[in-house]
């Protein structure tokens, strides 16, 4: 135990000596053995800080981007772009594994020690709640990346990912089933729910979990599990706290994924890494999803010669984990999947009114009324693509729905991810396997 605590203390000191994001407003606190509320808040900050930027790299696998073959980052990105997980170049950027478990490690220590060491105050309860949610969310991301989609009929035998719920630097973890990993995630969420003290975080600490973020997390999780009623219920609870949207028709409106946006729920994950943003163009086929009068075209993207590039990344002010637009889209999709067409259109039109010009909105309303339920679901999935572009969710949406064919070109050659390709489930990283034979 002493070795574990020393390791944590040294890591905290090292991480907290670095400069903070300009909107985080954190005062560095370093200690060898965390014992006070401030110590555990600092430890919790470290858990947030080391969390990986893997969704930026998942964007490369989707239909959103074209890789610039003259990019200085080409060697680190091309194999991600080409879905070459089996024999990547040694310079290839690794997908997140160790860093996710490092965040979990911080959360585990807080869960194990904070109450006994720092007391049972409301502030400590909030820190513990955030730790439970960080641990749950990291396991959720591991599942979405490295395991198949949740299927109630097979989840008890489908291979998931290792579960880490205790501080043990030398433990080797074997994969648990998808069912067991979800059971742990849901237990952590239940434990967090009982401890949460903050309904909605202040802008300067918007990276932290809150009750509002909890509801958004549950809504996404239930959507991915196909639990439509539960997803709707969670989305409604989140929107009951704050249902605002940025209206792109208004002068001075912010980018919806700006951390100061009125619809921001949690501004945490760096989904637009600079090395990806400067090395890619927006795919013309993806740009074709936007129709005339869609205000997002000029807000999300900008022209560079004959191409479009993203305006949503390259700055930590655009970090995002959850925002209200996703909750409206979850309400729309779940209602449509339940055959509740009127409710689906109502949720969808609330969003579209804030994203389209008045004339385009009128046209969209007319079109929505003519769609069959199956066509409406496809429209909503396309709307998720348009609204949440380059926020790291497109890969998960493709994986959990139709797993379509995607073609990427590189050096005049086409590379194809075929329909239902096994590579929609990413292999465990080689370094993880070499370090842990139990994988």
Image (cartoon, grey):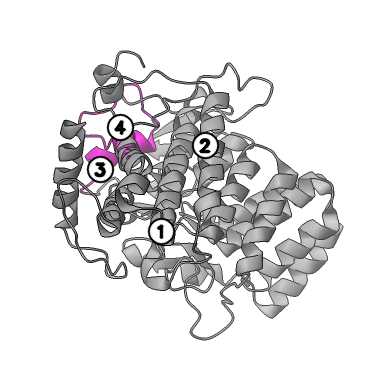
Q: Position of residue 102 (x, y in %)?
A: 29, 38
Label 4, label 1: how many angstroms apart (C-alpha)? 23 Å
Judging by the rendered image, the residue that carries numbered circle 4 is 167
- Would you say the residues marked 4 and 1 are in contact, meaning their CB atoms lie under 8 Å apart? no
Residue 160 visible from this viewpoint? yes
Give the numbered dot on residue 121: 1
| Residues rendered magenta in the picture | 72-99
Labels 3, 2: front one = 2
**What residue sits 43% from the left and 57% below the top?**
126
Q: Name the mark on residue 222.
A: none
Considering only vertical position in the picture, is 130 above or below 136? below
Q: Earlier in the sequence, mark 3 or mark 1?
A: 3
Q: Are marks 2 and 1 in contact (CB under 8 Å)?
A: no
Q: Earlier in the sequence, mark 2 or mark 1?
A: 1
* Residue under label 3: 74
Q: Secondary structure at mark 4?
A: loop
Secondary structure under tag 1 reads: loop
Residue where numbered disc 2 is placed: 185
Q: Position of residue 50 (x, y in %)?
A: 28, 47
Label 4, residues with CA under 10 Å away: few <14, some 14-19, many ≥20: some
Q: Nearer the viewer, residue 282 or 37?
A: 37
Inter-mark Cα distance, 3 to 2: 36 Å
Q: Give residue 278's position: percent from left, percent from top.
A: 29, 56
Indicate whether 162 appears above or below 261: above
Q: Most prominent secondary structure in the magenta stretch?
A: loop
> Tag 3 or tag 4, which sits nearer the N-term?
3
Whether tag 2 and tag 4 are in contact, CB under 8 A, the answer is no
Q: Quadrant of the N terminus?
A: top left
First in residue order: circle 2 vs circle 4: 4
215 vs 97, nearest the viewer: 215
């Amino acid at each position: 135990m002493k070795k574990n605590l020393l390791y944590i203390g040294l890591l905290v000191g090292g991480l907290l000596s670095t400069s903070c994001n300009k909107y985080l407003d954190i005062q560095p606190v370093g200690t060898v053995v965390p014992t006070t509320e401030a110590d555990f808040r600092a430890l919790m900050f470290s858990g947030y800080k080391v969390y990986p930027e893997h969704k930026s790299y998942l964007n490369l696998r989707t239909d959103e981007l074209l890789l610039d073959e003259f990019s200085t980052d080409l060697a680190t990105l091309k194999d991600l772009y080409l879905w070459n997980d089996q024999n990547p170049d040694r310079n290839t950027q690794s997908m997140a594994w160790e860093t996710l478990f490092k965040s979990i490690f911080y959360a585990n220590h807080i869960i194990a020690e904070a109450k006994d060491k720092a007391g049972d105050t409301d502030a400590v309860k909030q820190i513990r709640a955030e730790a439970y949610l960080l641990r749950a969310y990291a396991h959720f991301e591991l599942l979405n990346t490295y395991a198949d989609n949740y299927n109630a009929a097979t989840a008890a035998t489908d291979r998931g990912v290792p579960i880490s719920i205790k501080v043990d630097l030398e433990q080797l973890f074997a994969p648990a089933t998808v069912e067991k990993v979800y059971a742990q995630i849901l237990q952590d969420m239940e434990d967090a729910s009982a401890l949460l003290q903050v309904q909605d975080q202040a802008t300067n600490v918007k990276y932290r979990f809150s009750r509002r973020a909890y509801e958004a997390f549950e809504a996404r999780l239930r959507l991915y599990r196909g639990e439509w009623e539960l997803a709707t219920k969670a989305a409604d609870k989140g929107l009951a706290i704050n249902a605002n949207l940025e209206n792109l028709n208004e002068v001075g409106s912010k980018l919806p994924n700006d951390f100061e946006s009125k619809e921001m729920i949690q501004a945490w994950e760096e989904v637009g890494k600079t090395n990806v943003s400067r090395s890619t163009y927006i795919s013309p086929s993806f740009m074709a999803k936007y129709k005339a009068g869609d205000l997002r075209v000029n807000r999300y993207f900008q022209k560079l010669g004959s191409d479009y590039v993203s305006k949503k990344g390259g700055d930590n002010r655009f970090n995002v984990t959850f925002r209200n637009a996703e909750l409206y889209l979850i309400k729309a999709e779940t209602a449509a999947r339940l055959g509740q067409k009127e409710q689906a259109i109502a949720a969808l039109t609330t969003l579209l009114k804030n994203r389209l010009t008045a004339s385009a909105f009128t046209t969209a309303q007319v079109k929505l009324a003519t769609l069959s339920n199956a066509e409406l679901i496809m429209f909503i999935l396309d709307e998720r693509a348009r609204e949440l572009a380059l926020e790291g969710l497109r890969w998960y949406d493709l994986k959990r729905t139709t797993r379509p064919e995607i073609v990427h070109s590189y050096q005049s050659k086409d590379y194809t991810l075929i329909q239902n390709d096994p590579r929609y489930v990413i292999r465990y990283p080689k370094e993880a396997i070499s370090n842990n034979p139990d994988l």
